[in-house]
Amino acid sequence: MLQKTHSAAGLVAAEITLVYHDVTFLSWEAAGALLLGCLAGTLADVDKQGSTMARVLFPLSALLRILNVRHRTVTHSCLFIGALMLLALPLPVLYYWVFIAAYASHPLIDLLNEKGVQLFWPLKLKVRVLPKFLAVDTGSMSETVFQWLLLAISLWIPFRTIEF
């Protein structure tokens, strides 16, 4: 999936977290959470050379390249998400859960891709949830449709919470 799609998924994850924590969307706290969600949703691609996150976090990306970490392996695994949960503990509760949910949205939507994800790394098993003929290829029309669906959901969530 492309960065735009992961960012939209991170946004949706952040909005769901805001609703769960009963935080109004018209607050600075929500604005920070939404921004964090958009960024954290793309973070797992730090292992992909040329990605925005690999350029922004170049030292980490370079280290992963030196360690020969391939795309959709370590950074897309349950083990890595568990490690992030421990590392992110100092964050305030709302931002902690936004960060974790948005980051986890990344490997979850990559499960829709034909190539799958090494979700249980270090096991070599690649997991995907759709058969190849239904898989969402990176940059394809089906990804664009999925991206627009995520954006529609991201508009629906805040408006469904408004009371008239």
Image (cartoon, rainbow, N blue to C red):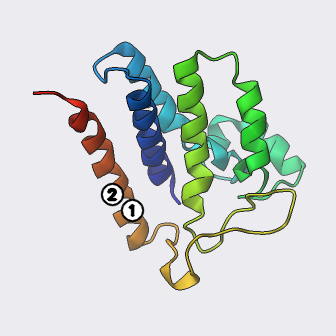
- Amino acid carrying label 2: it is Leu
| Residue 52 appears in the rendering | no
- Amino acid carrying label 1: it is Phe
In the picture provided, is 60 more to the left or to the right than 67?
left
Residue sticking out furthest to the left: 164
- State the SS at label 1: helix
Snapshot quadrant of residue 40: top right
Residue count near mark 2 (Cα–Cα under 10 Å), binned few <14, some 14–19, many ≥20: some
In the picture provided, is 82 more to the left or to the right than 10?
right
| Residue 45 appears in the rendering | yes
Q: Examine the rendered structure and indicate whether residue 125 appears above or below residue 88.
A: below
- Nearer-the-camera pick, 128 or 137: 128
Instruction: List x then y, in percent, for residue 18.
Output: 41, 28
- State the SS at label 2: helix
Q: Which residue is found at the position 34% from the left and 65% from the top?
A: 145
Instruction: List x then y, in percent, for residue 162.
Output: 19, 29
The tag on residue 146 is 1
From the image, tell me which residue sits under label 2: 149
Q: Examine the rendered structure and indicate whether residue 161 appears above or below residue 94.
A: below
The tag on residue 11 is none
Q: Examine the rendered structure and indicate whether residue 23 appears above or below residue 59.
A: above
Q: Which residue is found at the position 54% from the left and 22% from the top?
A: 95
Instruction: List x then y, in percent, for residue 121.
Output: 82, 56
What is the spatial separation of the Cα atoms under label 1 and label 2, in whole angstroms?
5 Å
